[in-house]
Image: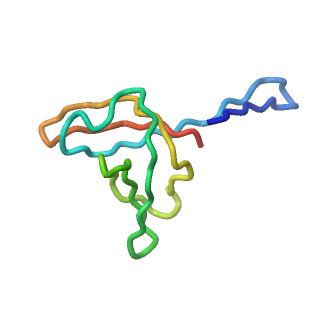
């Protein structure tokens, strides 16, 4: 992914792209690894609610309203945590 930073002309400081973190639930370990770039598929539910899946069906996000819709379709796995209810994958997106 080409990350282009911008220079704010009024202050001369570099603006860095914003990173968005999103959690996904994974049923078993070993489907993705920290540092791996993953592709995301968007699903649409009634009433403009969206959900996201790490392909190929490795993990699934919760539901998000239209105002919180994810713009990026690729991200990087930053953390995998094992909890009593399963594995939770944190993915960072540049938005």
- Measuring 24% from the left and 33% from the top, which residue is drawn there? 30
Q: Position of residue 73 (x, y in %)?
A: 52, 49
Q: Quadrant of the C terminus?
A: top right
Query: What is the residue that sits farthest to the bottom in this orientation?
Result: 46
Q: Does residue 19 appear left or right of residue 82 in this picture?
A: right
Looking at the image, the residue that sits furthest to the front is 56
Q: Quadrant of residue 2?
A: top right
Q: Residue furthest left?
A: 84
Q: Position of residue 17 (x, y in %)?
A: 64, 34
The reply, left or right, for residue 67 in relation to residue 44 is right
Which quadrant of the structure image shows residue 90?
top left
- Foreground: 56 or 48? 56
Counting labels gives 0
Q: Position of residue 14 (x, y in %)?
A: 75, 25
Q: Name above or below for residue 74 compared with residue 83.
A: below
| Residue 16 spot, x, y in % from top left | 67, 30
Query: Considering depth in this image, is 60 or 67 the residue closer to the camera?
Result: 60
Residue occupying image coordinates x 50% and y 56%: 68
Give the colour scheme of this rendering.
rainbow
The residue lying toward the viewer, choosing from 14 and 56, is 56
Task: List the single residue furthest toward the top.
Answer: 13
The residue sitting at 51% across, 44% down in the picture is 74
Q: Is residue 92 above or below residue 46?
A: above
The residue sitting at 30% across, 46% down in the picture is 58
Q: Quadrant of the N terminus?
A: top right
When asked about the image quadrant of residue 63, the answer is bottom left
Closer-to-camera residue (73/93): 73
Please tell me whether residue 42 is drawn above or below residue 73 in the rendered image.
Answer: below
């Amino acid at each position: 992914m080409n990350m282009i930073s911008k220079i704010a002309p009024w202050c001369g400081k570099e603006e860095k792209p914003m990173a968005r973190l999103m959690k996904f639930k994974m049923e078993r370990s070993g489907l993705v690894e920290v540092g791996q770039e993953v592709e995301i598929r968007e699903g649409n539910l009634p009433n403009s609610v969206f959900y996201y899946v790490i392909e190929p069906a490795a993990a699934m996000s919760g539901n998000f309203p239209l105002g919180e819709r994810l713009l990026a379709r690729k991200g990087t796995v930053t953390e995998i945590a094992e909890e009593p209810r399963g594995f939770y994958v944190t993915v960072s997106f540049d938005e």
